[in-house]
Amino acid sequence: MKYKVVLPVAGLGTRLLPATKEQPKEMLPIFAPDGRGGTCLKPLLQLVFEQLYSYGFREFVFVVGRGKRAVEDHFTPDAQFVEELERRGKTEHSRMVSEFYRMLSDSVLTWVNQPSPLGFGHAVLLTRHVVGNNPLVVQAGDTYIHSDGNRHISRVIEVFESTGADAVILLKRVADPRIYGVVEGRSIGGGVVEIEGVEEKPERPRSDLAIMPLYAFRDSIFRALEEVKPDKKGEIQLTDGIQKCIDWGGKVYGVELDAGYVMDIGNPMSYWEALQTSYRLASENKQ
């Protein structure tokens, strides 16, 4: 299948203010291997892109909003910058930047504007004319998920293609599901759950299976999101679109993340934890 990857990065990042007043939260750095046995810092969004590129995806749709110009600038190759690094003798830095630019040049990047932050589901819906009837992979731009050999991605894609599902979602069991989207369903073996219902940040969760922000969808998700009404904050939630697919009789499955790390930089404490986890993984050369 030919997938298009949707990366919503239009959120305001208010929980990380004032650091994110001018700098998009997705561009905040975490640690990564430098390719020579050491560590370096990379914007989290760059790591997300590189991981999806290494899996084999080549078409990316970035959903950006006001104040996100830094994202487009970073993802635009700059030959003069590389030349300046080489002139100054910064050969290792030049090598890392050049490798990133090689990936960009080998990919098709499309930019979609979300003028107002009207929700994760709204961001996905805005890409419908770019994605067309292709299957799509959606990953939040502020969360990096690590597993050996990118197993979490391959599992999601394998279940998506083998079942003919309308949607497949990455899941993880958590101690407090109230801050996540939560699913209810029945296990069908092999760490796969047939999902019967989803709910965004419930006060009384029906399970401990939380949604991690990696999804595979068919284009039916766009029709579902078009039918979703805004929530109390005026936002269109992706979970509501998924529930609409279920209500229509669509097949929706979840894949449990059995081993791996989820680095979410949505708030100061989770960002601090992401820095610690990424440093440990980078030092072990496991990212």
Image (cartoon, helix red, strand yellow):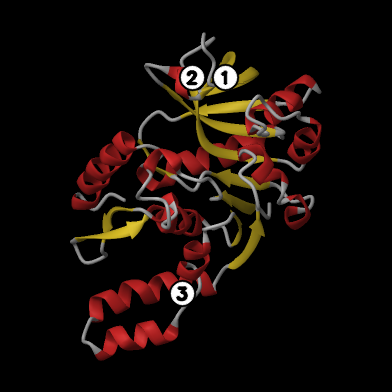
**Amino acid at the residue labelled 3:** Arg
Horizontal and vertical percent for residue 146?
A: 37, 43
- Is residue 250 toward the left or the right of residue 91 in the image? right
Measured along the vertical axis of the image, is residue 201 above or below residue 141? above
Foreground pick, 193 / 175? 175
Disc 2 crowd rating (10 Å Cα; few below 14, some 14-19, many 20+) is many
- The residue to which callout 2 is attached is 209
**Amino acid at the residue labelled 1:** Val
**Amino acid at the residue labelled 2:** Leu
Residue 126 visible, this angle: yes
- The residue to which callout 3 is attached is 102
Where is residue 40, by image quadrant?
bottom left
Q: Dot 1: what SS? A: strand
Disc 3 crowd rating (10 Å Cα; few below 14, some 14-19, many 20+) is few
- Is residue 195 toward the left or the right of residue 45 in the image? right
Say if mark 1 contacts mark 2, CB within 8 Å: yes
Q: Dot 3: what SS? A: helix
Horizontal and vertical percent for residue 270?
A: 33, 35
Q: Dot 2: what SS? A: strand
- Residue 183, numbered label: 1
Residue in the image at 73% along x and 22% along y: 246
Mark 1–mark 3 Cα distance, whole angstroms, equals: 39 Å
Of mark 1 and mark 3, the one earlier in the sequence is 3
- Residue 208, numbered label: none
Of mark 3 and mark 2, the one earlier in the sequence is 3
